[in-house]
Image (cartoon, coloured by chain):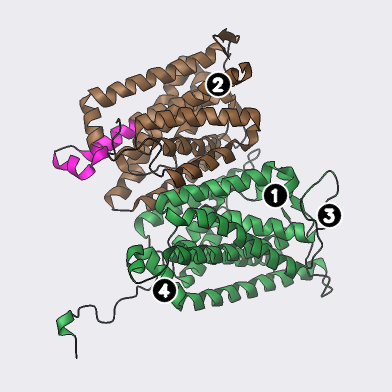
Amino acid sequence: MNEALLTLGFALVTASILALSAVAFTLQYAVTNVANVSHGEILTVGAYAAYLVHQRTGSAVAAAIGAALAGGFAALAMHSAVIGPFIRFGATPTIIFIATLGMSFVIQNTLVIFFGAANVAYTLDPGAPMHLGPFLLTPLDLQIIASAIAITFVLYLIISRTKFGKALRAVSQNRELARVTGINATRVAAATFFLAGLIAGYAGFILAESVGSFNPYFGFSFFLITLTAAVAGGLGKAFGTMIGAVLVGIILEFAGGYISASYNLAFAFALLAIVILVRPRGLFTNARRTVFE
Amino acid sequence: MSAYLVSVLTEGAIFGIMALGLNVIWGWSGDFDLAYYGYIAVGAYMTLVLTIGPAVAPAQYILGLTLPYPLAVVIAVLCSMAVSLVVGSIALRHLRGIYFSIVTLGAVYVMYVLAGQYVPLFDGYNGLSGLFDPMGDWFGLDYQSYQYFLMGLCLVLFVLVFLFMWRISGSRFGMALRTLREDERAAAAFGRDIYRLKLKGYVLGAGVGGFAGALFVAYLSAFNPSAWSPVEIIVLYAAVLVGGRGNIWGVALGVFIMGLIVQESTRFLPEVPGHPQIVLALRGVIIGLVLVLFLRFRPQGLLPERRYVDAQPKLEPDARPV
């Protein structure tokens, strides 16, 4: 029992990172109806940016901001250079899916050209682990969990309370109808990508920190787990995705803890296949398709 | 003929067979299948475990037989088809579009993780090796002449697969597959069993992929998880797309062009000391960009598929000649 609670504590760390990554992915899906396969590379770019900034300044806060900004601009570039033009050209979601897969290949290899394919060690001092109720967590773990909750709360406020959030919801429900009412759907989508990129870049930073190293392919393998969480929660639905991420994070951590961590990816996908086959529109669906239901 | 040309032609022929198999699934049936490289790998692994003999400790793998190479190829192809039948019957029943792609991506990663992590299967990350010059001693070939023999064999087999695909392309089966790509509901309205038809196309394509994998190990003589990665399927998709999706002449052209790009684009690049991956990475960037640019500006490819049009498209029901 005690061991199970300890595992649950670690699972909360995984789930926090996963929740940020998955919510960023699902926001992109919400405004464009496109599954952006190069989402994982935004995390990778965030991790590299954090590493470089940290080397220069020696400050973890600056590294986090650098990661978020790099992720934001990478996502914005992805939208304005690839996804936006494809949408205007009238390509089907599958074609854009393939194009983003191609871009993910391009970004991975570009990173290899500049930084090499080797693992980069990147660790912050996690501090002494301490008992917190039944959990055993380091201050770093607590910071990760707290920052994920804070970001989620801010995101909730943005989506539910601001004018931009209203436009985002409108575009995600019906792009054409939103345009008719005078919303610039392309600009809203670009802004949403920037916002999602900020979150994903930061997620890349905390993922690198909690894993302890990264390489040009590290975002892609995490993307595969992100995809599971996002599909389980319902593509395009931020709130469902959060819950999906927590569930997937907990299941993976327990499966990894009790069976073997090397099969994590296989577990995630077995889970994904089951969800898609049984509840293809996510675990928490009703008829409406909104960002926050 | 230089050794370089021999290896390029052999690889090109094998790559061409892979692309022709992929064309059945993506070009005709219209499904973006990410598990395809998994079927190539199954063909490659199975050929090895059926021919290289029992495992010597510390290596471990299943079977370890010493069957003659052609028989092993046949069994390996059947294994690829069996695996694709399982994946296809799950993924094709209700799923289309990106959901199909995501599930097949999942399937190939499950295969990849199993091959890499579950050591008793194919010796994990060490992989398998030891298939030297299959069929070479039947004809008493030395190492040098065997390379020519293998090149000839691969080219002949490529032509045979091409002719086979040519027959299928014009057959009722090939036409029916294309109708699924264009409009599944219309095909169903005409009484086609969509699921069975798609599954047939899928298993056929995977079988051709497995066959190419079996040839590939005759050329490589070894196979391990670092020899294949699920994302490398992008190169094959780029070839099919550039040439012309659905048109087998286009696919052949696409393989030629991508082969040229992959081989020659980085030929004049100076070696960067201490950075061995730079040439491979640059190729990756070029392949990805070619894929994206073609999708955007010429999605039908260089040699587009001939569109089949109704012979009398404008005829109104009451204007029909009696």
| Circle nearer the N terminus (4, 1) | 4
Mark closer to the observer (3, 1): 3
Q: Note whether A192 is above or below A155 in the view shown.
A: below
Secondary element at tag 1: loop
Chain represented in green: B
**Do marks 2 and 1 share a subunit?**
no
Letter of the chain that mark 4 sits on in the rendering: B
Magenta span contains residue A178: yes
Q: Which residue is mark 4?
A: B175
Letter of the chain that mark 2 sits on in the rendering: A
Q: Which residue is mark 1?
A: B224
Q: Which residue is mark 2?
A: A8
Q: Which residue is mark 3?
A: B54
Q: Residue at x 13, y 39 (%)?
A: A181
**Do marks 2 and 4 share a subunit?**
no
Amino acid marked by disc 3: Pro
Q: For marks 3 and 1, give the CA distance.
A: 17 Å
Residue B146, position as x, y percentages in the image: 77, 69
Q: Residue at x 55, y 76 (%)?
A: B164
Secondary element at tag 2: helix
Image quadrant containing the N terminus of chain A: top right
| Circle nearer the N terminus (3, 1) | 3
Q: Is residue B222 visible?
A: yes
Q: Which residues are magenta?
A: A171-194
Chain represented in brown: A
Contact, mark 2 vs mark 4 (Cβ under 8 Å):
no
Secondary element at tag 3: loop
